[in-house]
Image: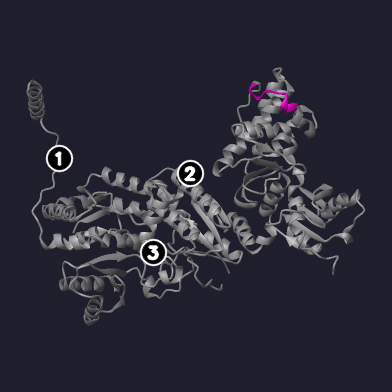
Amino acid sequence: MARPVGNNLCITPEVGSEDMDPDVSTRMIILGPKANVSESEVVNFLHLLDLPLTIKWTCYGAMVSGKDEYVRQAVEELRKLDPYGIFTKERGFAPGDPRKCRGHRHGPREGFHQMEKEFLILDYVGEALKHPKEVHIEKKEPVSLDLFKEVLENSFKEEKKQEGK
Amino acid sequence: MVKIALVSCGTEYSGIQKEIEKAALKFGAEIILPEIDLDFINEAYEKFGFSAQSSSLKLMIARAMSIVEGKCKPDAVFIATCFRCAEGALVRNEVRRFIQNNTRIPVVTYSFTERTKADELFIRMEALATTVTRRSILAREKQEGLTLGLDSGSTTTKAVLMENNKVIGTGWTSTKDIIESAKIAADEAFSNTNYSWGDLDGIGTTGYGRFTMGQEFKAELVQEELSVNAKGAVYLADCQKGEATVLDIGGMDNKVITVNNGIPDNFTMGGICAGASGRFLDMTSRRLDVDITELGPLAVQGDWRKASLNSYCIVFGIQDLVTTLAAGGSKADVAMAACHSVSEQVYEQQLQEIDIREPLIQVGGTSLISGLVQAVSETLGGIEVIVPEYSQHIGAVGSALLVSGMGHRNEQ
Amino acid sequence: MVKVAIYPPNSLVIADLVERKGHQPLALQKQIRQKIKDPEIDSPPMNITEDDPIKGLKYAAIEVPSGVRGRMSIIGPIIDEAQAAIIVDNAPFGFGCVGCARTNELSIFCLRKRDIPQVELTYPTNQDETMEMINDLHAFLDKLTEMEEAGEFAEEEGDD
C-alpha cells in the first residue's frame, strides 16, 4: 500500500530497525539557563565518548539515542561536565520520528511545552543542588488543644485591655 | 490537498487518530495541527476567557485562536472531544462558535468514543471536503432554471422538480430498483407539468443511491445527504442565515444536523433502535387501526400522561399501548403516548450528543405526523419546531436547489 | 534503587533529581516507548488503539470518557509499579498524556491511595520556593535510600 506522504500527522512511519528496538532509548539533554557548557560542547563531549550512540544537536541541548546501557553511561559521564547545569529526561519517541517530529507535522510535540515551562526554574534547581540544605519533611500537625486555648485566652485578654483603654 | 486542522484535546488517547486520518485521506484531505508556542497558548487562553482545567483544552483554544488570527490557514476545521466529558463539550461548542463567528472556514464537530470508526467519520469528512471544494455551490440561496432533484433513500425514492425558485412537481415511491424507482418518482414529478427529461437544465442526486443515479442520468451534482438535507431544510424553512438544527426521524434511522449559515457542522445518525424511529408510529397506527396520516391529528387531541407506557421498545412498548387500550384508554391518548415515546427515545439516544440550536426544522416523512412534531417540541422544553412545506421531500429539494446554476445542458 | 512514580509523570526536574539520587523514576516516556515500538500495532502516532481505553476500565468505569481511560492505560501501570511517589501540585502540566484534568485527578488519587512512601509538594513560583522544593525532594529521596538499605522495599518485592 502506498504510504500517504506530506504533512500528515498520522503517517505510518518509516523508522529504522534501531528505532523499533525495545532496548534502545532516547534521552534529551537539557542545558539550564546558566549552564557552564554550550550545546556544541555537549555534543562534542558525547561524540568523544566513542559509544555506539546517535547524537543530535538541538535547540535545548542534545538528544542521545542508543542501547539503554550506553545511554545511561553517556548521561553519567556527561553530568560530571556540569553537575548543576545539565539535566536529562527520557523521551518516548526516537529523534526525528515522523510521528512526533515538528518538522513533519507543523506543531511541536505536546511534551515540548512542559519542557519550556520547566526550563524556567532550572536555574534555581541548579542553585539548590549546589547548596543543599538539611531539611526535614514532616507533616504539619494541628496545635495541641492546650496551646490553642492559651492563644485564644491571651487574645481575649488583649482585646479587653484594648477596650478598657 | 484540502488541509483540515485538527482541534482536539487528545483523539490519539482514545485510539481513534488513525480512523480520523483514514477518513480524511479518503476524501482527498489531510489532517494538520496549527503551529503555536507556549506564550501564545497562555495569551490565547486568557483572551478567550474560558477557564478550562485541562491543559489540552487550553491547547485546543489556542489552536482555534491561531486559526482565527490567521497564523494557521487550514481549509477546514475538525473539532473533536471525548463523548461524555462535560468540560470538553463546553469548550468544543464555544470554540466552534468562535471559529464560525470570526472566519468563513467550514467546521465540523464530533464527540467520540473508542468505538468511533472511520466509517462514521466518512460522511463528516466528505461534508467538510465538499464544503471546501464546493463552497460556491453551497452558498446558493435561490433556485434558478428548471432542475430535478432525486433522493434515493433506503426505503423511499423522492423526486422534486423546481423552476425559478418554486417547487412545481413532486414524486414519491418506495425504493426497489434504484434506477426504476427514480424514473417512477421523476415521472410523477413531471406529470402535472408540460416538461420532460429533455427540458431540464440540471439534475442533482443524493441519498444512498446517489452514485448509481448520478451515472445513469449523468447528473451534474452527486452529493451526500448531510449537506443536501441541511441546505434543503434551511432553504424551505427560510433560515439560511444563522443557526438551526435539522431533525429527520426516518422510517429506519434518524439524522440530526446542526447548521450554521446553511452549512452543516455536526451530525448524528442513529439506527439501532426501532423504538426511536417512524416504524414505532407505523406499528401504533396499525394497532389503533387508523391510517398513518390520521395518527398525527388524533395524537394532538390526546394526553400522553394518561396512557401508561413503561418501555420505549417496539415490542414491549406497543404491548403497553395495547394494555392501555384494553383497560379502556382512549385512542388519542395512546397515539400521543406513542409520539412521546419516539421523541423521548430520540432525545435520549441522539439529541444529547449534539448542541441543539433554535429553530429546529423537522423534515422527512414523519414530520407530517403533527403529534410527533408537538411531542418533539415538548420533549425539548417547548423549543420552536418548524415543519416547512415539502418537508418530506427535503433531500430532493436540496439537490434541485444546489444543482441549479451548475447545469447548462440546454445551452449546449 | 527504588521505583519512584512522579506526577506530573513527564516532569524533567523531578525525573532528573530522582535519578541523581540513584533511584529509578517511573517516567511516562518509557511506557510510551513500549507502545510506539511495538511492531504488532500500527496505529500512529501513539499506537493507542481501541483496546487501550478498554484496558483503562481497570481504573475508571465505562461511563468515563474514552480519553481518560486511554490515558489511564498508560499511566495506570506506572502507579501500580511504584514503590514510592512524588506528587507535585500546581505543576505546569504538559499536554497530551497529562493534558486531561480528569485523568490527572484520578491518577493522583490512585497514587495517594497506595500504601507507599510519598511526598506532596507545591510547584515553586520563585527562587526561594524552588530551593525549598529541591531540598524537600532531596530529604525524601535520602529517606528512601535509608529505607531501602534497611531492606524495607526488598520485602515488598516478594509480594503480589
Q: Position of residue A120 (x, y in %)?
A: 25, 61
> Which residue type carries mark 1?
Lys
Residue A109, numbered label: 3
Looking at the rendered structure, the secondary structure element under dot 3 is loop
Q: Is residue A73 left or right of residue C104?
A: left
Neighbourhood count class around disc 3 (C-alpha, 10 Å): few under 14, some 14–19, many 20 upward: some
State the SS at label 1: loop
Q: Position of residue A156 (x, y in %)?
A: 10, 24
Q: Amino acid type of disc 2?
A: Arg
Q: Which residues are magenta?
A: B298-305
Q: Residue furthest front?
A: A165
Determine whether, in the image, residue B253 is placed left or right of residue B289: left
Q: Residue furthest right?
A: B194
**Secondary structure mostly seen in the magenta stretch:** helix
Location of residue B124 by image quarter: bottom right
Q: Secondary structure at mark 2?
A: loop
Q: Which mark is residue A140?
A: 1
The disc at residue B84 is 2
Viewer-proximal residue, B235 or B89?
Answer: B235
The answer to whether A130 appears left or right of B268 in the picture is left
In the rendered image, residues at marks 3 and 1 fall on the same chain: yes
Query: Which label's residue is closer to the chain start, 3 or 1?
Result: 3
